[in-house]
């Protein structure tokens, strides 16, 4: 599940300058959080990542009461509301978070809302936002309605059997920087830089000779997956809107698979990019070996960090040639402030967050 968290600009389609600005802002916010009275008062916080595709034609009317409920329970984070459903991440005292979840599920349309939990030593957000959007994960195809058109869920324990059946086309719906550090054996990488590029890839691959082209007048069976479920659920709805009848998606996404399926039986290769300070995880959701470039926000392997183009907090092999010397000087000053903050045991840097 790729729920929205601290940073609202995780998609790589944003102009590079905007991404740098967000990086600076997220760093400031984290420093503010560390010294805020709220974070000092409570040592343990519950984080809940959630999403549900459901028809919410009155979504705008839900904004104010939902925000009031969160604020009344000292809950922070970001929730997105759209006609197609809800998506987001919230955090706060356990009782407060559970009260908000209960409030959401009191709406019969959200009675089956699922969420994933994690615990944090300090509050990862400094305010609460409930935003109105056209989509809860941006694809840019208005006629796709996941609540009504999504493909068939496949449980993690049944996934291996499905993807090895003859004729099944396996598609990774994540962005290229995510796929680059790990994916399922035999999966197709569409090489997208944002989720909104996926419809164009689908259209191209449906043409004769493409990976999704019909054979003898029949469209192929397709299995799709993503980090937590939201993108592949919408992707299968896209395919169904184009006449694909047998379309499947991994229930709970890659994270649920890595948590559920024993490593000896796994068909996953590499690590899974995640939108928090872990950067990547492996089987059993154990933290992986990747770190994050604080300039371009790409995941970095040990090999990347050994490159002469890598400078901590300033550049990496992926972005070194995309920034000016003036910008690099600014990043060096930021890194100096980071190191000073670390000496004071204060957090300074924010993390990259999901857009879906």
Image (cartoon, rainbow, N blue to C red):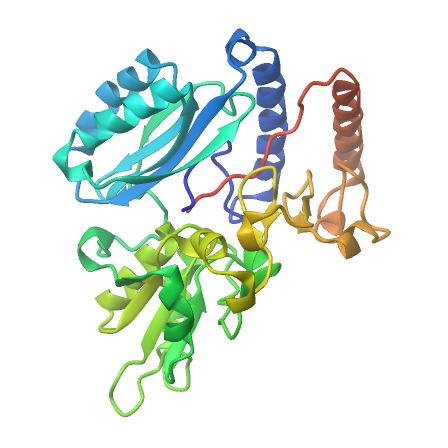
User: Is 334 left or right of 204, judged from the image as shown?
Assistant: right
As displayed, is residue 275 above or below residue 172?
above
Whether residue 34 can be seen here = yes
Q: Quadrant of residue 247?
A: bottom left
Q: Front-most of 44 and 176?
A: 44
User: Is 292 left or right of 80, judged from the image as shown?
Assistant: right
Give residue 35's position: percent from left, percent from top. Answer: 61, 11
Q: Front-most of 47 and 33?
A: 47
Give residue 234's position: percent from left, percent from top. Answer: 31, 55
As displayed, is residue 347 above or below residue 184?
above
Give residue 154's position: percent from left, percent from top. Answer: 32, 63
User: Is 147 left or right of 235, judged from the image as shown?
Assistant: left
Tell which residue pokes out farthest to the bottom in this image.
216
Give residue 169's position: percent from left, percent from top. Answer: 40, 76
Q: Quadrant of residue 329?
A: top right
The residue at 38%/85% (across/down) is: 166
The residue at 80%/47% (across/down) is: 310
Tell which residue pokes out farthest to the right in this image.
308
The residue at 38%/53% (across/down) is: 231
As displayed, is residue 225 above or below residue 166?
above
As displayed, is residue 161 above or below residue 238?
below
Q: Front-most of 120 and 89?
A: 120
Q: How many marks?
A: 0
Whether residue 5 can be seen here = no
């Amino acid at each position: 599940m790729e729920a929205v968290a601290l940073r609202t600009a995780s998609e790589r389609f944003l102009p590079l300058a905007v991404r740098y600005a967000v990086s600076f802002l997220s760093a400031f916010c984290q420093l503010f959080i560390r010294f805020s009275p709220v974070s000092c008062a409570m040592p343990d916080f519950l984080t809940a990542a959630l999403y549900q595709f459901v028809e919410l034609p009155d979504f705008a009317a839900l904004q104010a009461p939902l925000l009031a409920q969160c604020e009344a329970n000292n809950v922070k984070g970001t929730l997105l509301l759209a006609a197609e459903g809800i998506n987001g991440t919230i955090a706060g005292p356990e009782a407060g978070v559970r009260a908000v979840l209960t409030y959401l599920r009191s709406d019969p349309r959200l009675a089956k809302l699922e969420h994933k939990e994690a615990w944090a030593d300090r509050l990862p957000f400094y305010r609460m936002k409930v935003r109105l959007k056209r989509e809860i994960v941006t694809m840019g195809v208005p006629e796709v309605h996941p609540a009504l058109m999504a493909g068939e869920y496949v449980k993690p324990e049944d996934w291996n059997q499905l993807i090895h059946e003859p004729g099944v086309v396996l598609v990774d719906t994540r962005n290229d920087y995510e796929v680059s550090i790990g994916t399922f054996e035999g999966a197709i990488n569409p090489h997208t830089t944002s989720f909104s590029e996926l419809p164009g890839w689908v259209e191209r691959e449906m043409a004769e000779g493409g990976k999704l082209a019909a054979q003898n007048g029949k469209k192929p069976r397709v299995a799709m997956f993503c980090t937590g479920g939201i993108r592949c659920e919408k992707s299968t709805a896209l395919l169904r809107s184009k006449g694909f009848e047998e379309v499947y998606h991994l229930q709970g996404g890659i994270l649920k698979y890595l948590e559920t399926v024993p490593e000896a039986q796994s068909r996953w290769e590499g690590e899974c990019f995640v939108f928090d300070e872990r950067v990547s995880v492996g089987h059993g959701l154990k933290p992986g070996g990747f770190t994050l470039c604080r300039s371009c926000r790409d995941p970095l392997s040990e090999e990347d960090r050994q490159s002469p183009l890598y400078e901590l907090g300033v550049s990496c092999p992926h972005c070194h040639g995309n920034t000016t010397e003036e910008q690099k000087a600014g990043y060096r000053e930021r890194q100096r402030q980071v190191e000073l903050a670390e000496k004071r045991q204060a957090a300074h840097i924010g993390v990259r967050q999901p857009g879906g």
